[in-house]
Image (spheres, helix red, strand yellow):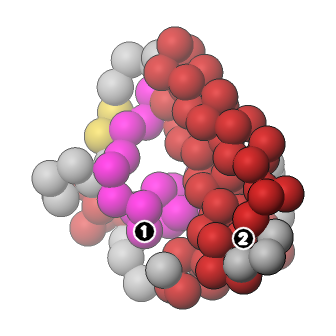
Amino acid sequence: MVSIKWCLKQKNGLEVIEPNSIIADSYLKMAEESLNVLPNMIISKIWTVTATYYIFYYSLYAVMLRLGIKCEIHACSLEFMKRYLESYFDKKDNEMTIKRFLQE
């Protein structure tokens, strides 16, 4: 598992930026679009799992951008969620998302 300390040292890892609601909203739109196409993917377990993961991830990333956190390493974003957004995402959300990430 990655650590916050490791993520802060990585290129494209965790980075504090100016909060950006415009980019955050674009990630929410991507999550909504993924939700809209999800019923068409039900016949494929692989695509259903992938789309479900990205719906959750895009939503998480939108929250991070609104807070002023940028990260292009999924494992680091998930670690940030686990450490600093625990009052918004429960342990079950965290475990489910990490399982999905490891399956990809």
Which amino acid type corresponds to the residue marked 2 in the rendered image?
Answer: Thr
Instruction: Give the quarter of the image for residue 28.
Output: top right
**Dot 1 lies on which element?**
helix
14 left or right of 12 in image: right
Taking the spot 42% from the left edge, 68% from the top edge, the residue there is 75
Q: Which residues are magenta?
A: 66-84
Taking the spot 50% from the left edge, 30% from the top edge, the residue there is 65
- On screen, residue 61 above or below 6: above
15 left or right of 55 in image: left
User: How much space separates mark 2 and mark 1, taking CA atoms?
Assistant: 20 Å
Instruction: Give the quarter of the image for residue 70.
Output: top left
- Residue carrying label 2: 48
| Label 1 neighbour load within 10 Å: few <14, some 14-19, many 20+ | some
Per the rendering, the mark at residue 75 is: 1
Per the rendering, the mark at residue 15 is: none
Taking the spot 53% from the left edge, 63% from the top edge, the residue there is 78
**Dot 2 lies on which element?**
helix
Which amino acid type corresponds to the residue marked 1 in the rendered image?
Answer: Ala
Please provide percent x and percent y for residue 43.
79, 76
Is 16 in the magenta? no
68 or 58, which is in the foreground? 58
Taking the spot 72% from the left edge, 70% from the top edge, the residue there is 48
First in sequence: mark 2 or mark 1? 2
53 left or right of 10 in image: right
Main SS of residues in magenta: helix
Is 77 in the magenta? yes
Please provide percent x and percent y for residue 17.
34, 25
- On screen, residue 102 above or below 43: below
Please provide percent x and percent y for residue 50.
61, 69
Residue 95 visible? The answer is no
